[in-house]
Image (cartoon, grey):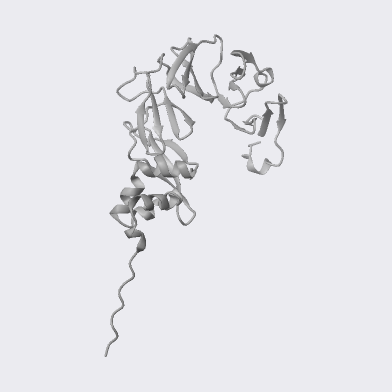
């Protein structure tokens, strides 16, 4: 006589109400969300729901840092698209196209503030006149327009965020330079500032806002100063870490560092093997 067939165990999580399941998923790293979405249609809908990010992950403090990049393929009609670097469950990483976001403007400037990426300037292939400003909500991968920029800037503007305000530096034509200030709290543009003879090359995220060799101090009374130690050195391709600017000197094949507090340059030691080999 054959033994009775044992019933298959039921998945208890399937019997839980949606709000409980959302609370559980909110505690799981986003790199596992694609696997959770593949379980069933119900889970796929819950992972994609705004409630997961709007309430649960924010209230629980389950926020994660993400890297977004703008890539454009070669081609006459190709346009910049937004990609997200995601971690796979096995520990690897891959770039994933954010299909819910449209193509980005050409030659735009991007500034990340909290969970949003602000987009300033640039142009579409068939629309080069509109002074556009946009914002990307990285929680839901949606995009909304911002108030129109007070001035149309040609080329790629430079942007820097400081104390809740975004300073957008650019040219209205080949000679006139202008600085527009966007308040991220009120979501409005403030009266524009002008600074004649300023040279626009880089905007750095130091304790103050640096534009090439000119420093804008936004923590005190509004003023512009010349940073002479920066001005006397030719520098480009700069990144900032802990208030120190790092720049590669291609002429002498050295990595240089500028301390904004001590206001002095120094050579970074111990990285010679990482630098490119120079032909004699």
Instruction: Find residue 252 and report its horizontal and vertical position in percent.
Output: 67, 31
Is 224 placed left or right of 165 in the picture?
Answer: right
Figure quadrant of residue 14: bottom left
Among all residues in the image, which is located at the extreme left? 1
Placement of 84 over or under 129, stated as above or below: below
Residue at the image position 34 percent from the left and 64 percent from the top: 11
Residue 193 drawn at (x, y percent): 51, 11
Quarter in which the N terminus is drawn = bottom left
Q: Is residue 150 left or right of residue 257?
A: left
* Location of residue 229 (image quadrant): top right
The quarter holding residue 273 reads top right
Front residue (pair 17, 267): 17
Count of numbered circles on the image? 0
The one of 104 and 73 positioned closer to us in this rendering = 104
Q: Nearer the viewer, residue 38 or 7?
A: 7
Quadrant (top left, top right, bottom left, bottom right) of the C terminus: top right
Residue 108, can we see it?
no
The image shows residue 2 at horizontal and vertical percentages of: 27, 87
Q: Residue furthest bottom?
A: 1
């Amino acid at each position: 006589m054959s033994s009775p067939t044992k019933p298959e165990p039921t998945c208890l999580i399937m019997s839980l109400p949606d709000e409980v399941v959302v609370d559980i998923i909110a505690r799981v790293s986003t790199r596992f969300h694609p696997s959770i979405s593949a379980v069933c249609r119900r889970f796929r809908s819950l992972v994609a729901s705004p409630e997961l990010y709007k309430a649960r992950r924010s209230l629980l403090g389950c926020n994660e840092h993400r890297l977004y990049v703008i890539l454009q393929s070669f081609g006459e009609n190709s346009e910049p698209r937004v990609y997200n670097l995601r971690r796979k469950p096995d520990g690897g990483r891959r770039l994933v196209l954010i299909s819910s976001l449209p193509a980005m403007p050409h030659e735009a400037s991007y500034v990340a503030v909290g969970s949003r990426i602000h987009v300033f300037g640039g142009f579409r292939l068939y629309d080069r006149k509109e002074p556009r400003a946009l914002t990307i909500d990285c929680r839901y991968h949606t995009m909304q327009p911002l108030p129109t920029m007070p001035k149309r800037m040609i080329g790629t503007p430079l942007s820097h965020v400081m104390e809740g305000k975004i300073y957008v530096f650019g040219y209205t034509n080949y000679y006139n330079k202008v600085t527009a200030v966007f308040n991220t709290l009120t979501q409005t543009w403030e009266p524009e500032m002008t600074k004649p003879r300023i040279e626009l090359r880089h905007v750095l995220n130091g304790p103050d806002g640096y534009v090439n060799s000119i420093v804008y101090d936004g923590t005190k009374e509004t003023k512009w100063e010349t940073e002479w130690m920066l001005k006397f050195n030719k520098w480009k391709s700069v990144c900032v870490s802990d208030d120190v600017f790092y720049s590669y000197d291609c002429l002498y094949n050295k990595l240089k560092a500028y301390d904004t507090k001590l206001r002095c340059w120094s050579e970074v030691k111990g990285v010679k093997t990482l630098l490119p080999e120079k032909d004699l």
